[in-house]
Image (cartoon, rainbow, N blue to C red):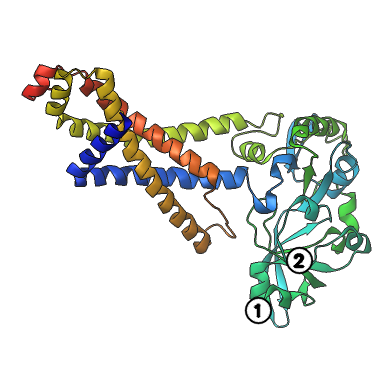
Amino acid sequence: MLRNYLLTAWKVFMRRKLFTLINLLCIVLTLVVLMVVASLLETAFRPSGVEGKSERFLQVFAMRMESPKRDSTSTSPLGYKLIDKYLKPMPGVERVSAVTMPQAVSVYQGDSVSELQMRHADADYWKILDFRLLAGRLPTAADDAAGRHIAVLNESSARRLFPGTPQVAIGQRLDVRGQSFEIVGVVGDAMHLNAFADIWAPITTWASSDYRNQLTGPFVALILAHRAGDLPRIQRQVETIANGVVHDDPTQWKTIRFWADSKLDLFARMTIGSTEHADSSASVLLAIIGSAMLVFMLLPALNLVNLNTGRILERRAEIGVRKAFGATSAQLALQLVVENVLLCLAGGLLALGATALVLAWLEQSQLIPYLEVDINLAVFGWGMLIAAVFGLVSGVLPAWKMSRLDPVHALKGAA
């Protein structure tokens, strides 16, 4: 039975090649957009590579302070004091790291000046994230304790500043904000939120030690759990810790709140959520993304319904003959749906190839700096599922309508 369906589908596709081509183009364009978006979302929410441990780490990006007297609020990144005093001693976690957000700095190399994005990070940062070390070494706790003026460059910056292999940059020196740093390591480029930077240096190389006494500042806390199942417990711990934080000026800022978020939770909180409560609105964000993708898929699907209806109308005589010889409406509907699903799956395979080309172009164009995104098995599976759903959505209605034609009317050419 299936073999007959496949043979019939192939003959139908070859009978009207232009119509088949138009259908394929519509399917491919739709699926390419959907799969490119799916690939970028997966890279953002479930990254591999440098943030491959993201399924078991959380990030605290900001704190919300409330003043009951002035009825005002203030939202700020964390200070080193808050991370060091309240979060690092937290029990039941593998590591807690303090790292600054990227800041633009002028880097002097003899008479030349370059603009780079710089982070200051502690030694735990290099153990939470899995940077690809290309040359040299990574900073250690001993470097932090000694306040050594060392730095790590990413690959692109190392090649730009010191042409040649990454090894050429090791041992070279750069001047940043009046301080001289020795390059001890070169790592692969990374565009992920917690890893994006051009140059890194230990926190203890800061020109002033005032950061140690500041509750607010330019820092982010990364918390690595032993297991992914520990994350809900750690989130509750962080919420409890926040309730116990005392501001340096408790009369002005009485209440302090902050939350430990996953990658998805953080994005949701920054876009549609709030810093007022623990719920990041991640479920709402996923519903919005899913609804948008569904609507985007339905629009061309409706167009394909009309195209498929026109194609099936041309086969009224065939449908009439098959019904006259005993074919049931269910059998005819299944045949027509199988044809449409096969066409959409073929479009899905073509779309996968086109998606790979689009993603490669995005990487080369540097529209998103240091972007590395691949079509993995998960995206391939979702692409095929989307193609199948696309075929069902655009094929069921015309198939059901035409399978119910009266055979006499169908043979006479009446709809």
- Residue 64: name its quadrant: top right
- Mark 1 — residue? 164
Direction bottom: furthest residue: 111
Dot 2 or dot 1: first in sequence order is 2
**CA gap, disc 2 and disc 1:** 16 Å
Which residue type does callout 1 highlight? Gly
Residue 216: which numbered mark, if any? Answer: none
Residue 275 percent across, percent down from the top left: 70, 34
* In this picture, residue 400 sits left or right of residue 222: left
Q: Nearer the viewer, mark 2 or mark 1?
A: 1
- Residue 78: name its quadrant: top right
- Mark 2 — residue? 152
Residue at image coords 93%, 60%: 145
Residue at image coords 49%, 33%: 290
Residue 27 percent across, percent down from the top left: 34, 42
Q: Which quarter shows the N terminus?
A: top left
Q: Sort mark 1 into few (<14), some (14-19) or many (20+) by Cα contacts within 10 Å.
A: few
Foreground residue among 374 and 266: 374
Foreground residue among 331 and 103: 331
Foreground residue among 84 and 53: 53
Depicted 324 relative to depicted 163: above or below: above
In the rendered image, is residue 179 in sight?
no
In the rendered image, is residue 131 in sight?
yes
Which residue type does callout 2 highlight? Val
Residue 116 percent across, percent down from the top left: 67, 66
Foreground residue among 224 and 396: 396
Residue at image coords 63%, 38%: 264
**Could you say whether the residue bearing mark 1 is in a helix, strand or loop?**
loop
Depicted 239 relative to depicted 198: above or below: above
* In this picture, residue 69 sits left or right of residue 338: right
Residue 39 percent across, percent down from the top left: 52, 46
* In this picture, residue 291 sits left or right of residue 46: left
